[in-house]
Amino acid sequence: MKPLIIAMALVLAAPLPANAQTHPRTPRDLRQLAQQNGIRIGSAVDLTALREEADYRKVLNREFSHVTGENAMKWESVEPERGTYTWEDADALVANARRHDQKVRGHTLVWHNQLPAWLTTGVEQGTIDDAQLRDILRDHITTEVRRYRGKIRAWDVVNEIVDDDGAMRQSIWLTHLGPGYVADAFRWAHRADPHAKLYLNDYNLEWNSAKIETTYNLIKDLKAQGVPIHGIGFQGHLGIQYDYPADWANVMRRFADLGLEVAVTELDVRMVLPVTPEKLATQADYYRRALTDCLSVSACREFTVWGFTDRHSWVPGWFDGEGAACLLDENLAPKPAYQALLAVRRS
């Protein structure tokens, strides 16, 4: 072998310096992207679509390593009549996840919305008093968390408990149980599954200063009391007609400094219809920036989108004239936002 060839071979075989950066190949899908970056990328799941649409099921299980039931684990879904439980959808979500190496986020244990009619009517009519309401809440949390003990990575224990003005949200829980219901909920959930990560989850925490301050101080106080709260969930419902929340990464770090795990739990990026190439490009940039922000914070362990296809999106039903919020279109074709995510790397 000629000396020049030998020298080149030795150079190519030499180990990289410790400070050298390697550039992994472009990932083939979101699951591989997540693996390369040491994070779980997830999606909310429509259980009817999971059962009935083979193409939806195939994409979900190929792309995502984390799943959240869009509605399957909410109180009105699991106990529509008092003492009568319907676990079929929640069980199906968990079973599918276990078959496809997906972790599960339980959503949600305590919320002011989507409560069963028997509960809200009973409170309104006075047939359920405050002491009974506390017992009912404890039993609900204990029953659901215990059923899936060891099968849920993280629970959204309390959801949307701070209003946009920074005040604690007025709900049947605050009105009838007082602010102590928050600590109680975390303690009951922890007792039912000591290994699950327990989260406070909310919207507009990405940018709303009043909401951020109240939530931060609440969690700081809970931790001072020894309450088992482990994570903060940023829902991330964004719209391209509004500025991207440029300080989001710093807000994540602030909560992480309290010793919390961080997750983006419900990301979508809606637009005013009709769809145009320019709007899709802006949407792609928002998705890219959101994942970049998450990866810049070592405590950010999960990046979940609230549905992956425009075929099954909550947005058109809630925001008149808006839509196209997901990574894939109605035909499950990747949009520019999907490709933008594949290009993101942890810095």
Image (tube, grey):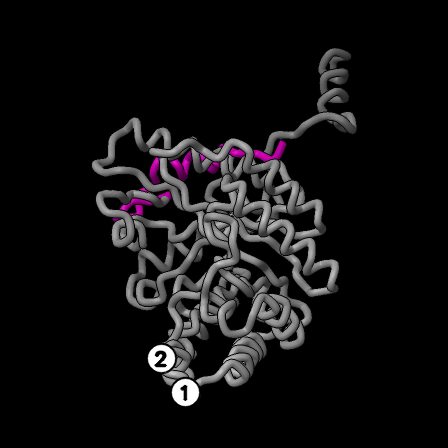
User: Which residue position holds label 1?
Assistant: 127
Q: Is residue 93 above or below residue 238?
A: below
> Is residue 32 visible to us here?
no
Q: Which residues are magenta?
A: 327-347
Q: Position of residue 299 (x, y in %)?
A: 66, 46
Q: Mark 2 and mark 1 in contact (Cβ < 8 Å)?
A: yes
* Residue 293 in which image quadrant: top right
Disc 2 secondary structure class: helix
Q: Secondary structure at mark 1?
A: loop
Instruction: Tell me the kind of residue under disc 2.
Output: Thr
Considering depth in this image, is 311 or 56 the residue closer to the camera?
A: 311
Question: Does the stretch in magenta take in 332?
Answer: yes
Amino acid type, callout 1: Thr
In three-dimensional space, the C-alpha distance between marks 1 and 2, rounded to whole angstroms, equals 8 Å
Upstream in the sequence, badge 1 or badge 2? Answer: 2
Vertical side of 235 occupied by 227: above or below: below
Residue 205, x across and y down, in percent: 52, 46
Mark sitting on residue 121? 2
Residue drawn at x 44%, y 54% is: 43
Q: Position of residue 114 (x, y in %)?
A: 38, 68
Q: Quadrant of the C terminus?
A: top right
Measured as percent of width and height from the top left, residue 86 is found at 40, 81
In this rendering, would 22 be left or right of 325? right
Q: Is residue 288 magenta?
A: no
| Residue appearing at x 29%, y 48% in the figure | 310
